[in-house]
Image: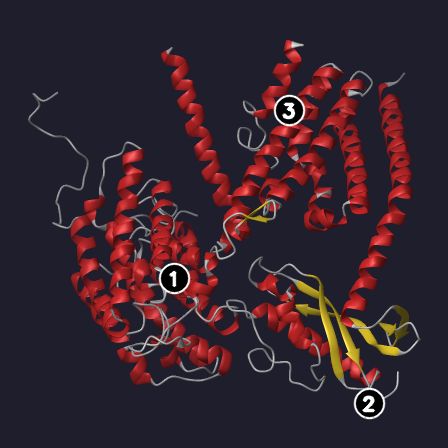
């Protein structure tokens, strides 16, 4: 049980895919123009991550090592296509915004990396705990980036006008450079926090 | 089992199962997706042709027209799709046209990739409303007869030239003052 | 180790008497001319913008260096030059807090993040300016006419959108709408020539840059004199394309840099979406600087071509 909690928490902070491992940058930078997009993209990715990790972990002794990558890809691509279809059918508005980036979950490194490095080597419960942690870690990270960009770029948060109607919009935050600038500054802050806590531990 | 045979069998099983899952999900999701597309199309036609309650699709000279009708079957105008070149890519729009009057009846932006908060404001009624009642013989030039958005001139220009070039074809098929 | 009396250092050993500080303050002095012209034409609001931008740039550099535990070197004057250049590159109608944002970005994201003076690949003032242009497009393109302060268009925008030319004399003296420091061609020219005379600016860059714009606009059937005098070409050519850090070090390289930037300006002005392209042209060529440097390494004296 302790191991499962540890696996779950790992993705939330210590090995956070976005801020620690810097993988899965494509959706991170591309869809985070609003906090809601971050949540939607994050949850879609979490769904794919959990189910593909579960399946790959279950079948880990059945898949021959030499063809494991094609097998992983088929599993992941299947779940992504299912998500894409159901999103288009039941959440057309959010599907239109995320657009091409839903199918592109297939090539999100986070999923492939967890399948190859973790799920294919451990028991199903651990794989699912890890996938949930990674997925939610990815979700909070891109939601945070989305929130910063939405707040500065449109003056809103989850669509609500929190800065007042007259707030100046920083257009750059909604454009690709804004994604890089936000990401870079948040990474810097993360590093300062981690370094500080590491120093505190050493002192005690 | 020979290891190569095993690889092939495993991959085959994966592909077949994946195909089955996808076919099944497609069966469930596709009617819904089609329904959304139809609803969006119908809404945009009703939006650009005020008073329309139903429409008929007409194919003429390689273009698709949507003939708008009201409950009594009176013709309310025709709607067609036009494409303009914007700042961030093509701008797809639905244009309403009343050949009897020779005027536009409405404009709706269907899809675009303009800068949010700037060029993307071409979607707002403040911009699209100005095309309502506009004569098809107008020059459609930004800053002259087309109001632009402060800080963004390319997107409105793309909309205007997109409509203008589509109208050149449309007014040949449905001449001003003629029946349709 | 203080018992050693002799210092052993590698060459060079003769100091020219120049220092970063001396050069930077000369540049700042030369920039005073366009600044004064801007203040003359646009009034106190121009003066407030220049002072705030400069103070904000200096403060940002000091804070960054303090935070990172590095020695504070704001007195070398480079932040002052960046702040002044940024203010000269914005519209006089810009809200003051926005120019502060520009200064923070110019120094913070344009210079300190790369490790400070000498490490930045792009001209910091231009980074700040382009950031502002993209972030606040409406406020950055709200131009005002000199003296009366009513809103109006710049000569380049008038030419591009409506095909209206502006009088050469007005352009030369600076009685036209535009960025704070680029309106008066005369003031920029005098300041630039002073820097060339002092040897802080290599004539090759401004000459090849402006020359390319003149030749290209002439070939394409446009008015070359108008394109030289209007907009920020002169300010860019003398003060920003000549930044020692972000431009090539070789003589041939500098000519290539100027020609490249000139081509970009003409392309953007005549065929691009923006009426003005000086900032983008210099930033684009900044990106090419390392390649140009490598391609134009002069042969060492006595070296024989081996092939």
Quarter the N terminus of chain C occupies: top left
Give the letter of the chain under mark 2.
Answer: B
Relative side of A9 to B100, left or right = left
Q: Are marks 2 and 3 in contact (CB under 8 Å)?
A: no
Where does residue C236 sit, x and y in percent of width and height?
33, 64
Give the SS element for disc 2: loop
Q: Residue at x 25, y 51 (%)?
A: C55
Residue picked out by circle 1: C256
Give the letter of the chain under mark 3.
Answer: A
Question: What label sits on residue A133 in the rendered view?
Answer: 3
**Tally of marks:** 3
Of marks 1 and 2, the one in the foreground: 2
Q: Is residue B158 visible?
A: yes
Give the SS element for disc 1: helix
Q: State the residue in front, C232 or C258.
A: C232
Residue at the far bottom: name it.
Answer: B177
Question: What label sits on residue C10 in the rendered view?
Answer: none
Q: Residue at x 49, y 42 (%)?
A: A182
Q: Residue at x 74, y 83 (%)?
A: B103
Where does residue A155 sit, x and y in percent of width and height?
52, 51
Q: Residue at x 90, y 16 (%)?
A: B1
Where does residue B140 sit, x and y in percent of width and height?
64, 81
Residue picked out by circle 2: B177
Colour pattern: secondary structure
Q: CA distance from mark 2 to mark 3?
A: 66 Å
Q: Residues within 10 Å of mark 1 (few under 14, many from 20)?
A: many
Q: CA distance from mark 3 to mark 1?
A: 53 Å
Q: Are marks 1 and 2 on the same chain?
A: no
């Amino acid at each position: 049980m302790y191991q499962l909690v540890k696996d779950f928490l790992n993705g939330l902070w210590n090995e956070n895919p976005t801020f620690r491992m810097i993988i899965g940058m494509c959706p991170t930078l591309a869809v985070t123009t609003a906090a809601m997009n971050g949540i939607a993209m994050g949850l879609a990715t979490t769904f794919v991550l959990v189910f593909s990790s579960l399946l790959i972990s279950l079948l880990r002794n059945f898949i021959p090592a030499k063809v494991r990558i094609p097998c992983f890809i088929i599993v992941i691509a299947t779940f992504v296509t299912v998500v894409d279809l159901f999103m288009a059918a039941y959440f057309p508005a959010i599907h239109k915004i995320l657009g091409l980036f839903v199918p592109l979950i297939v090539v999100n490194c986070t999923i492939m990396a967890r399948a190859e490095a973790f799920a294919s080597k451990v028991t199903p419960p651990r794989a699912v705990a890890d996938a949930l942690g990674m997925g939610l870690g990815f979700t909070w990270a891109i939601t945070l980036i989305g929130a910063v960009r939405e707040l500065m770029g449109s003056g809103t948060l989850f669509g609500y006008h929190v800065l007042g109607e007259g707030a100046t919009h920083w257009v750059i935050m909604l454009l690709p450079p804004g994604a890089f600038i936000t990401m870079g500054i948040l990474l810097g802050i993360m590093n300062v926090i981690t370094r500080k806590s590491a120093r505190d531990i050493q002192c005690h | 089992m020979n290891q190569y045979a095993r690889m092939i069998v495993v991959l085959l099983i994966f592909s077949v199962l994946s195909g089955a899952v996808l076919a099944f999900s497609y069966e469930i999701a596709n009617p819904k997706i089609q329904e959304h597309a139809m609803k969006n199309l119908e809404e945009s036609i009703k939006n650009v042709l005020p008073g329309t309650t139903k429409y008929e699709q007409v194919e003429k000279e390689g273009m698709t027209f949507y003939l708008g009708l009201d409950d009594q079957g009176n013709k309310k105008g025709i709607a067609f799709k036009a494409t303009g070149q914007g700042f961030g890519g093509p701008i797809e729009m639905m244009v309403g046209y009343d050949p009897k009057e020779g005027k536009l009846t409405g404009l709706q932006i269907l899809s675009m990739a303009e800068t949010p908060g700037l060029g993307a404001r071409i979607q707002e009624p403040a911009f699209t409303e100005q095309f309502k009642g506009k004569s098809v013989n107008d020059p459609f030039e930004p800053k002259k007869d087309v109001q632009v958005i402060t800080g963004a001139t390319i997107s409105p220009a793309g909309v205007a030239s997109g409509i203008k070039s589509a109208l050149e074809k449309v007014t040949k098929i449905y001449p001003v003052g003629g029946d349709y | 180790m203080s018992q050693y009396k002799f210092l052993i250092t590698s060459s060079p050993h003769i100091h020219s008497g120049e220092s970063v500080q001396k050069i930077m303050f000369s540049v700042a002095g030369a920039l005073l001319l366009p600044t004064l012209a801007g203040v003359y034409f646009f009034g106190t609001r121009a003066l407030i913008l220049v002072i705030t931008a400069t103070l904000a740039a200096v403060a940002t550099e000091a804070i960054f260096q303090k935070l990172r535990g590095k020695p504070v070197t704001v007195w070398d004057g480079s932040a002052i030059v960046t702040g002044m250049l940024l203010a000269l590159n914005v519209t006089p109608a810009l809200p003051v807090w926005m120019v502060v944002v520009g200064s923070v970005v110019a120094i913070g994201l344009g210079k300190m993040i790369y490790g400070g003076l000498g490490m930045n690949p792009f001209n910091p003032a231009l980074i700040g300016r382009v950031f502002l242009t993209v972030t606040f497009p409406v406020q950055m393109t709200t131009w005002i006419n000199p003296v009366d302060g009513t809103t109006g268009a710049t000569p380049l925008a008038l030419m591009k959108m409506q095909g209206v030319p502006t009088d050469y004399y007005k352009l030369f003296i600076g009685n036209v709408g535009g960025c704070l420091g680029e309106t008066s061609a005369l003031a920029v020219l005098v300041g630039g020539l002073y820097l060339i005379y002092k040897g802080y600016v290599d004539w090759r860059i401004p000459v090849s840059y402006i020359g390319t714009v003149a030749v290209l606009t002439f070939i394409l059937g446009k008015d070359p004199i108008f394109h030289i005098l209007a907009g920020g070409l002169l300010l860019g050519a003398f003060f920003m394309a000549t930044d020692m850090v972000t431009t090539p070090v070789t003589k041939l390289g500098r000519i290539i840099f100027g020609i490249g930037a000139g081509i970009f300006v003409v392309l953007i002005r005549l065929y691009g979406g923006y009426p003005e392209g000086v900032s983008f042209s210099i930033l684009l060529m900044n990106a090419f600087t390392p390649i140009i440097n490598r391609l134009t390494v002069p042969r060492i004296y006595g070296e024989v071509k081996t092939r």
